[in-house]
Amino acid sequence: MEIPDDLHYTKEHEWVRVEPDGTVTIGITDYAQEQLGDIVFVELPKPDDETFVLKDEAFAVVESVKAASDVYSPITGKVIESNDDLPDNPNAINEDPYGDGWLVRLEPKNVDDVEDLMTSEEYEELVEGLED
Amino acid sequence: MRRTPLYEDHVAAGARMVEFAGWQMPVQYNSIVAEHHAVRRAAGLFDVSHMGEVELTGPGAEAACARLFANDARSLAVGRAQYSMIANPRGGLIDDIIVYRLGAERFLVCVNASNAAADLAWIREHESGSCTITDRSDATALIAIQGPEAVAIVAMLAPAAQALVRFGVGELQIAGVRALAARTGYTGEDGFELFVDAGAATTVWRTLLERGGERGLIPCGLGARDTLRLEAALPLYGHELGPDTSPFEARIGWAVKLNRPDMIGYQALSAAAAGAVRRKLVGFFVEGGIAREGAPVFAAGSAAGDAAERAVGNVTSGSHSPTLGRAVAMALIEIDAGAGPFEIEVRGKRRSAVVTNLPFYVKRA
């Protein structure tokens, strides 16, 4: 189970990376992709000036063979980019959840909001609790 | 929760176990999609020991099968199997089954795990008393090996396997274990289903995996079994089939033989065969997500409030087809719903659904 220590996490198993330019990238964790199994369909928001996502609101859907799962935004912001490669290759989330499997990039309303999220240590504890 | 004799092997192999019909069963070992492809391209090994086995023996066994089951067991030669059903008097189904004729007066019936208890009670209640009914479920393990390499793998251990024809059944010796081998399956591929004593299941399972590995054999879970049977449009009880669904709605009317007026359900099934059915099972390609079981099907263009708003049917099974790389669904829709276009509700949104011929996948000859 990979849990990079430079990311922020949510209890719904999303990760957030703060980029050098102040934008944030969002994806689902290694644990989440493993629980879901083979991901075969992804629905992402379209980036434009009007596409805002709100903290704790479902903004994307990932579907595995067995089930559909909403992805909740860890943070409020404007969608500036969606991972266009995912609809044709949703399996990238399984293979590289913290890299090629990223979902969207946001311009956060307030980048300090990420400080409210879990650290890698806190998230690791959460996952260990779930696996018991 | 019940466990099959192979439970420890599944856990040791890292399978994800789920509850199914009161049993703890492997849903996947590693990846449903990879396991699915293994069966289409090489071979997969399935533990389906949760399924039930009921034996009918004695001078009256043939007549009992002929009355209890919708296909005509009298036409079965010894060493042959047929797809059949247990119909209720309304012409709906209590279960769909495979009947194996093991002797002139000996029939083995393989039933769904979810219906095993009800089937046994029904058979005991309606059997005329002229045959012996034995529940073999606890003493029997069932291992399915399926895929283009399946026959060659079994033949490495038991050369006689080659001689078993499709829907043939006979005894094989596999790793010193006596197995009742049937050239049947539930994946749309060639292969065998092997009935063995519960105590010998691990020997057969491990030997097949060991020897079959070189030909690409891997263990497969119920997840791949479901996507494989869906591509092959094989109905699953509780989804396409049920007490209020006619076999003539569910595309299995071909297995109903209306040549015995004393067979249970004869009148209702005769009426259904003559056209008295409300629905038909159709296949869809779905855009924009996976239409899951229960999703309503609409005539395209109808919107909330329209007269045409009423759903014309519901999805019975829907998933991603790994072979086709797209979302597929089977749905029971009203027989006069027309030719489409249709839409299916996927996570609250109407999505385009294009009718396509069933099955979605046919094995190359």
Image (cartoon, coloured by chain):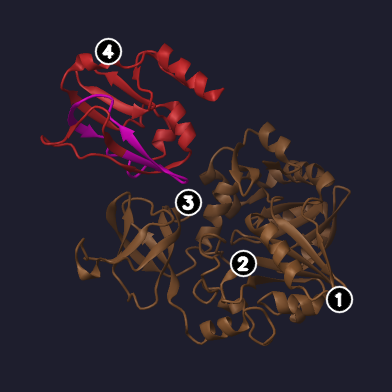
Chain colours: A red, B brown
Mark 1: secondary structure: loop
User: Looking at this rendering, what residue extends furthest in the front direction?
Assistant: B125
- Is residue B330 positioned above or below A82 on the image? below
Mark 2: secondary structure: strand
- Residue at image mark 2: B94
- Residue at image mark 4: A115
Q: How much space separates mark 2 and mark 1, taking CA atoms?
A: 26 Å
Q: How much space separates mark 2 and mark 4, taking CA atoms?
A: 58 Å
What number is the disc on residue B162?
none
**Percent position (x, y) of residue B170?**
82, 65
> In the shown orientation, is residue B337 left or right of residue B86?
left
- Is residue B331 positioned above or below A81 on the image? below
- Same chain letter for marks 2 and 3: yes
Q: Is label 2 in contact with label 1 (beta carbons under 8 Å)? A: no
What number is the disc on residue B104?
1
> In the shown orientation, is residue B54 left or right of residue A32?
right
Which residue is at a point 45% across and 53% down the rendered structure image? B319
Q: How much space separates mark 2 and mark 3, taking CA atoms?
A: 31 Å
Which residue is at a point 68% across and 37% down the rendered structure image? B10
Q: Provide the residue span drawn in magenta.
A: A61-89
> Mark 4 — on which chain does it sit?
A
Q: How much space separates mark 3 and mark 1, taking CA atoms?
A: 43 Å
Comparing labels 2 and 1, the label whose residue is closer to the camera: 2
